Amino acid sequence: MKPTRALALVLLALLFTWAGQLAIGYIQVGKLEPILNEETNLPNPPTPSGFAQTGARVFASEGCIECHSLSVRGPVGSADLTRGWGPRRSVPRDYLFREPALIGFSRIGPDLSDIGERMKESNDLMAHLLNPRKLKPTSTCPPHPWLFDVKLTGPRPENDAMTVITQEWKQVVPSYKAKALVAYLQSLNLGYPLPEAPLK
């Protein structure tokens, strides 16, 4: 067999494999639609706000996806569920309104698929971004001080000021990026049932 013919066959095999992967992905995910919740008349999965979608881009740009996954794995009784990372496993339908659909693969830190339910208070999430070891001394998450502005404070600090240093008349205030990131984290919630993944 001539080398050019062998190369053409290899390229053709790769092309068919690639096309097959696209077709299988479309068959599995391409026709998925949200499920209407009959009690609330809202779609499941819920549609995140535009601010939360901006926060998803901050999440990606800050490198959070390098240490955290966004996919609870396994059947009932699996390690992810027993750790309390979510009430059920993640399924493709959960990512319908997530653009970009961040899944991640590394788990240096815990999975964040259900962090909006586990840490409901935005102040706790802000405090974690500012200094993770203050909330959890064993945390390996690095602090993100660049997501906060240090401003002079007047007679009263701003409403969303994290800390106030009274001797220096300064306050630490979350930036737009920090607020968007927290909005995104609060939108991560698996507390709704789906036909292919009922709640435990």
Image (tube, rainbow, N blue to C red):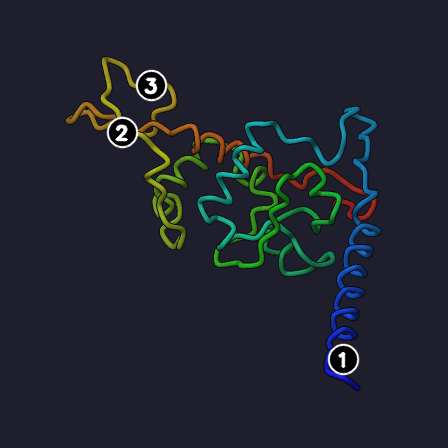
Report the disc number at residue 158.
3
Q: Quadrant of residue 19?
A: bottom right
Q: How many marks?
A: 3
Query: Looking at this view, is 20 or 134 the one in front?
Result: 20
Extreme-left residue of the structure = 167
Q: Residue at x 61, y 46 (%)?
A: 113
Q: Position of residue 199 (x, y in %)?
A: 75, 45
Position of residue 142 in the picture relative to residue 119 (left or right): left
Q: CA distance from mark 1 to mark 2?
A: 64 Å
Q: Residue at x 15, y 26 (%)?
A: 167
Q: CA distance from mark 2 to mark 3?
A: 11 Å
Q: Position of residue 185 (x, y in %)?
A: 54, 38
Mark found first going from the N terminus, 2 or 3: 2
Q: Position of residue 111 (x, y in %)?
A: 56, 51
Q: Which residue is mark 1?
A: 6
Mark found first going from the N terminus, 1 or 3: 1
Position of residue 118 in the picture relative to residue 97 (left or right): left
Q: Amino acid at mark 2?
A: Val
Mark found first going from the N terminus, 1 or 2: 1
Extreme-bottom residue of the structure = 1
Q: Amino acid at mark 3?
A: Glu
Query: Looking at this view, is 44 or 54 the one in front?
Result: 54
Q: Position of residue 49 (x, y in %)?
A: 61, 27
Report the disc number at residue 190.
none
Report the disc number at residue 150.
2
16 relative to 196, above or below: below
Instruction: Identify the secondary structure beneath mark 1.
Output: helix
Q: Residue at x 55, y 35 (%)?
A: 184
